[in-house]
Amino acid sequence: MNGCEHLSEIRSVTPSSEGCEDCLKIGGRWVHLRMCMSCGHVGCCDSSPNKHATRHYNESAHPIVRSIEPGEVWGYCFVDDRFYETLPSA
Ligand SMILES: [Zn+2]
Ligand SMILES: [Zn+2]
Ligand SMILES: [Zn+2]
């Protein structure tokens, strides 16, 4: 796979939370969950009202997320706006 340079920032992380950790704090609701591959932050997708995965990227500059929806393994680099069918493991 011809990867962007951010794939090197993937760590062996575990999800920080069962749901979007920021929504859980504020009692918000989410549509889909994304996990940050740098720190394990779990945030909600851009179809969710609070877009916490994107907000986490804006605050942390952690570039790569993956879907943690059941059966979904795709990843996404915010910096390059690039989707990956699968991500390499750390
Ligand atoms: Zn990238
Ligand atoms: Zn959220
Ligand atoms: Zn992160």
Image: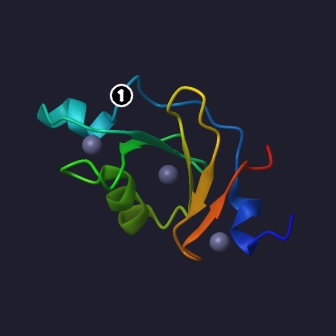
The x and y percentages for residue 60 are 44, 62
In this view, the residue farthest toward the top is 18
Does residue 43 lie above or below 84 as drawn? above
Residue 70 placement: quadrant: top right
The x and y percentages for residue 9 are 69, 59
Q: Residue at x 21, y 51 (%)?
A: 50
The residue that mark 1 highlights is: 19
Q: How many marks?
A: 1
Question: Does dot 1 land on a helix, a strand or a loop?
Answer: loop
Of the 4 image quadrants, the one containing the N terminus is bottom right
- Residue nearest the observer in this picture, 34 or 55: 34
Of the 4 image quadrants, the one containing the C terminus is top right
Q: Tell me the kind of residue under disc 1.
A: Gly
In the image: residue 12, left or right of residue 1: left
Q: Is the residue indicated by label 1 positioned so its CB lies within 8 Å of ligand 2?
A: no
Does residue 85 lie above or below 34 as drawn? below
The x and y percentages for residue 42 are 43, 39
In this view, the residue farthest toward the bottom is 80
- Residue nearest the observer in this picture, 39 or 51: 51
Q: Residue at x 60, y 28 (%)?
A: 71
Q: Residue at x 12, y 31 (%)?
A: 27
In this view, the residue farthest toward the right is 1
The x and y percentages for residue 84 are 68, 58
In the image: residue 39, left or right of residue 50: right
How packed is label 1: few (under 14 Cα within 10 Å), some, or many (20 or more)?
Answer: many
What's the coloring here?
A: rainbow
Q: Residue at x 48, y 67 (%)?
A: 61
Residue 33 placement: quadrant: top left
Split into quadrants, the picture shows ligand 2 in the one at top left
